[in-house]
Image (spheres, grey):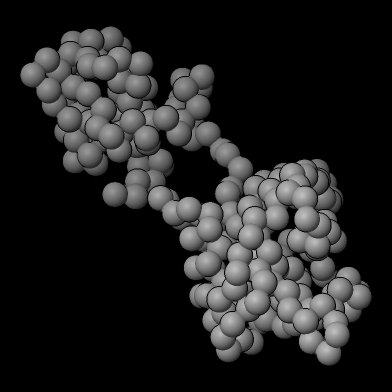
Amino acid sequence: MNINPSEIHPIQGHILRDLLYHPERKFSELNHKNIPSDQLSFHLRRLGELNLIRKTEGGYELTASGKEFANRFDTEDKKMILERQAKIGVLVSCTKQENGKNLYLFQQRLKQPSYGHYGFITGKVKWGESVFETASRELSEETGLEAKLSLAGIEHKIDYSETGELLEDKYFFVFRGDDPQGKLIENFEGGRNLWLDKDKALKLPDLFGDVPAVLDACESKTFRFWEQKFTVEKY
């Protein structure tokens, strides 16, 4: 069950936090704030319905889902606020030779945020999915192609607005795709794909700032890790 943290009542948050630090807790131990019994029972039932806790012979414990969910919170904050973390994704840079030139597969983003910007195929790593599986899936879904994928590096990309507001914080597993096969999907909902040589690509308007570093990583034979911070004019 995909649970929105905003659905969790503060009392339920305190119950989850308590059980995070104890293998099992009795009803009375969970009620250290002297909440009316019927009210506490209601919240315990609700957490059970959400499959976050279960009743045991001695009291209550977190389910496997409950352990994962509760561990996502900033436990130093007594209000149990969901801890924000960087997003994990993949980036795929496909390359091929045509008329003696190296061409790279670029994608123009036609959805928000960063509408109109040019970069590479990207996508979020799904729960339980390996980064290679994500790269292969995203390449197929967004371009119709298959390629020989190799991990070229890991990028940590942080975007700020001109006023200093943190907009995006992402880690990308950067893949190089060689020997692409299949019929290219040129246009799809949310973007369009096109082959370009490096010189033309670097002259594109609204080019994502990390494109030069990604190209360097994919052209290199050495695995790379890099971090970059950008100030974004358009978002």
Q: Residue at x 58, y 48 (%)?
A: 87
* Residue 62 vs residue 175, the one in the foreground: 175
Q: Residue at x 91, y 75 (%)?
A: 199
Q: Residue at x 64, y 60 (%)?
A: 150
Q: Is residue 128 visible?
A: yes
The image shows a total of numbered marks equal to 0
Position of residue 54 in the picture relative to residue 154 (left or right) = left
Q: Position of residue 1 (x, y in %)?
A: 29, 49
* Residue 233 vs residue 33, the one in the foreground: 233
Q: Which of the image's four quarters has the C terminus?
A: bottom right
Position of residue 12 in the picture relative to residue 87 (left or right) = left
Position of residue 7 in the picture relative to residue 102 (left or right) = left
Q: Residue 191 lies in what quarter of the image? A: bottom right
* Residue 153 vs residue 128, the one in the foreground: 153
Q: Position of residue 39 (x, y in %)?
A: 20, 25
Q: Residue at x 51, y 19 (%)?
A: 76
Q: Is residue 168 visible?
A: no
